[in-house]
Image: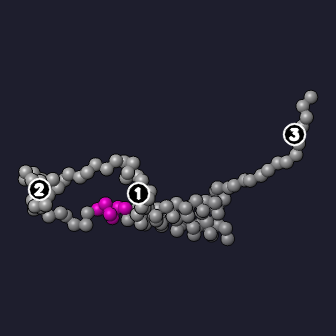
Amino acid sequence: MRDWIAVIIAVLGVLLVLAGATLILLRALPARPAPAAGPSPSALSSDGSDTSDLSPAVPVGARISSAWKEPTAADRLIFWGVILLVLAAIAAGAITFNLGAAGGATPATR
């Protein structure tokens, strides 16, 4: 019975990780090609140069902290998938915990 539980949890964990990866890939793909027209009037600066490709530089630390504070749905799916995979490994016996304590006096030295 323990093996069945481990297999079911492992399959669910793999499915969650794959679903999260799929969401990341789908978000990375463009929905449709951008129109080939010139820059929009709002993207032109006061001197007429195109500023549509300029974006403010975001520090790496800020991006990591924002990803940690506000995870996307794909991040959450991957997180829970990894948790289920760890639980499956514990249920299958691949990861074991051995807690023990010894009591008694130490032998006297001469």
Residue 81, x across and y down, in percent: 51, 63
Q: Which residues are magenta?
A: 24-29
Between marks 1 and 2, how big is the CA–CA gap?
Answer: 31 Å
What residue is disc 3 on? 106
Mark 2 touches mark 3? (CB < 8 Å): no
Task: Please tell me which of labels 3 and 1 falls first in the chain.
Answer: 1
Q: For this view, does 101 lie left or right of residue 2?
A: right
- Please state which amino acid type lies under the numbered disc 2: Leu
Residue 53, x across and y down, in percent: 19, 53
For image coordinates 41% across by 57% down, the residue present is 67
In magenta segment, residue 97: no
Tell me if residue 19 can be seen. yes
For image coordinates 88% across by 42% down, the residue present is 105
**Structure colour scheme:** one colour
- Please state which amino acid type lies under the numbered disc 1: Ala
What residue is disc 2 on? 44
Secondary structure predominantly adopted by residues drawn in magenta: helix
Residue 62, x across and y down, in percent: 38, 51
What residue is disc 1 on? 67
- Residue furthest out toward the front: 46
Between marks 3 and 1, how big is the CA–CA gap?
Answer: 52 Å
For image coordinates 29% across by 62% down, the residue present is 29
Kindly state the secondary structure of the residue where label 1 is placed. helix
Task: Please tell me which of labels 2 and 3 falls first in the chain.
Answer: 2
Quarter assignment of residue 23: bottom left
In magenta segment, residue 26: yes
For image coordinates 46% across by 64% down, the residue present is 76
Q: Which image quarter holds the N terminus?
A: bottom right
Between marks 2 and 3, how big is the CA–CA gap?
Answer: 82 Å
Label 3: how many residues lie within 10 Å, few (<14), some (14-19) or many (20+)? Answer: few
Of circles 1 and 2, the one toward us is 2
Q: Which image quarter holds the C terminus?
A: top right
